[in-house]
Structures are given as structure tokens and as C-alpha cells.
Image: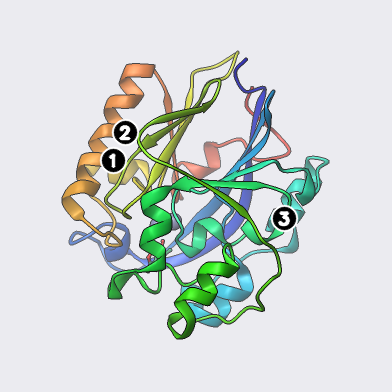
Amino acid sequence: MSANKVYLLDGGTLVIDGYHAFWNRGPGGELRFPCYAVLIDHPDGLYIFDTGYDHAHVERVLPFEKPLQTETQTIPGQLKIVGLKPADINYVINSHYHFDHCGGNIHLTEASTLCHAKELEACGCPQPFEVLGYSDLSFSPEMQQQRGSEVLNALPLDIYTPKFETLGGDQEIAKGLWLFETPGHTAGHYSLMVELKNRRPMLFTADACYSKKNMDLMCISSFHLDPVASLNSMQRLKDLAEKYDAELFYSHDPASYPDYQLAPNFYS
Ligand code: 5PN
Ligand code: ZN
Ligand code: ZN
């Protein structure tokens, strides 16, 4: 059985410069974009793909990104509007461990945590230019301890002890739930495709492509481990969308976001 429902959980907005959104192209200037999590109601359990950012973390470590997030836009707040509580979630999948994709993990204390093996390895030993991106290690108290003084936020340890399951290669992790390797933005980046009964598959690019404009221009964002791999992954997403007749959902797209159905509405 494929997934029953997909909810997009709004997580507020951040600001980056246009030259970060469109590498070496711009135009420059403040660009405010949305962040969201994806909740999948599947016969095998409740899955969340990415968990947005933690407001307090961004205020402490990246205040220049001017986070706007209400109580309702937190993971507990969004789960509440669909009649769930954080402890109901069975699996968390992280596309990658940048702060704006894993900040809500800490609420999901009962879930098993899935990611690419290379991603977990990379954020334990980031390149110097990746340290800010990987600044929220609250998803792994163990990793936080290991990184020690490098960590920019010092949350108390032992808040929770997530169970990690690391993956490699393309994987159908449950019927109709596909993870596709899309490296470049980070070492172990995954995009997710969800098959549903009554509509085209949904292909969540995560940060392998911030927006439709990035795709149309074939222009990557400036946060990347490997720009050539990033561009190849963007092409891969295009090819996957065509092969499966999937609809692309971008991670940070102020232009497309108003057309997305947000929780409590859902796709089925
Ligand atoms: C939104 C945002 N801001 C900063 C960084 C970073 O340093 O790596 C990734 C990233 C972001 O997605
Ligand atoms: Zn990212
Ligand atoms: Zn992001």
C-alpha cells in the first residue's frame, strides 16, 4: 500500500541574500523564503521528512537570517493542527543535517531516525565552510558531545537518545516511499518521492533544488560541498520527475509556496 496522506507542515521563514539563493548570479538583496516539514501518513507508520529550524537556535547562531516562526509553526504546533502529538511520529527522515532541516527532530523523541550514512559522517566532521550550516546538532546529543568546542550552540545533553538507521544508495524505505541520492549540496543528501493513490507522485527536492527558479535557470544555491555534483543532482531530479511523472516540490520557494496545500489540508 502506498501512502494515505501527505501534509506539508509550515515552519516559518528565513532570509538569505539573493547571491546565496542563486550562486554567482543573484540579484543580491534580501530574499525571504519558507521552510516546511513533510508528514506522511503511511500504512507502516507516521513519517516526517525534515523538521524545519529551531527558532531559538537561529536567533542565537544566525540572527541575520531574521527568523519568523510562530508557536503554531513549530513541529508540536503543526502536529497539533492535524490532531497529532510529537510522540506519535514513528520515523524521522532527514534529507540532510543543515539547521533548517533538523531543528525539530528533538521533539520527536519516540521516532527512529533515518538518513544517508555519508550525511551523518559529514556533519560529524564538516568542512570549515559547512560549520554554520551544521550548527544545530540537537538531533544527536552524541554527535554534539563528539564535536565539542566546535559546536556553536550548547544545548543540554541527554535530552533524548534517537535511534539512527543509516542508509546508502537509492532506497524504497516503505511501499511508495522512495529516497533518491542527490549529493552536492551536502555529502549525503536525499530527496524523497511519495506515491499516492489519487494523484501524481510528489517529489520533494529538499535542498538539492531550493526553487523552481533555480531549476529553470539550472542555477544552484551557494551553500554546497560540491557545485558540480549539485548541478548533476538538479538534473537528476528533472529526469526523475519526467520518468515517474512526478510533481516537484521545492524546499525554499517563495514563488511556488502559495500554491502548495498546507496542513491541515493534505494531499492524498
Ligand atoms: C538558510 C541557510 N542558511 C545558511 C546556511 C549554511 O551555512 O549552509 C546551509 C544554509 C542554509 O540553508
Ligand atoms: Zn541545506
Ligand atoms: Zn535548507
Look at 63% across and 75% down and name the residue there. 56
Which of the pair 218/28 is nearer the observer? 218
Local SS, label 1 = helix
Queried on whether the Cβ of the residue with tag 3 lies below 8 angstroms from ligand 3, the answer reads no
**Side (left or right) of 147 relative to 105:** left
Residue 86 on image: x %, y %: 76, 50
Q: Residue at x 60, y 14 (%)?
A: 197
Q: Secondary structure at mark 2?
A: helix
Q: Is residue 176 above or below residue 207?
A: above
Residue 16, given in percent of the width and then of the height, sits at 40, 67
Which circle, 2 or 3, is nearer the viewer?
A: 3
Which residue has dot 2 on it?
A: 237
Pinpoint residue 230: horizontal percent, then vertical percent: 24, 48
CB-based contact (under 8 Å), mark 1 and mark 2 = yes
User: Toward the viewer: 176 or 30?
Assistant: 176
Using a 10 Å C-alpha cutoff, classify the residue at mark 1 as few (fewer than 14 neighbours), some (14 to 19) or many (20 or more): some
Query: Is 96 rendered above or below residue 172?
Result: below
| Image quadrant, ligand 3 | bottom left
Gap between marks 1 and 2 measured at Cα:
9 Å
- Residue 191 occupies quadrant: top left
Q: Nearer the viewer, mark 1 or mark 2?
A: 2
Residue position for label 1: 215
Label 3 crowd bin: few (<14), some (14–19), many (20+), radius 10 Å: many
What residue did someone put label 3 on?
A: 109
Q: Answer with mark 2 or mark 3, whichever residue precedes in sequence.
A: 3
Q: Extreme right residue here?
A: 83
Assess whether mark 3 and mark 2 are in contact (beta carbons under 8 angstroms): no
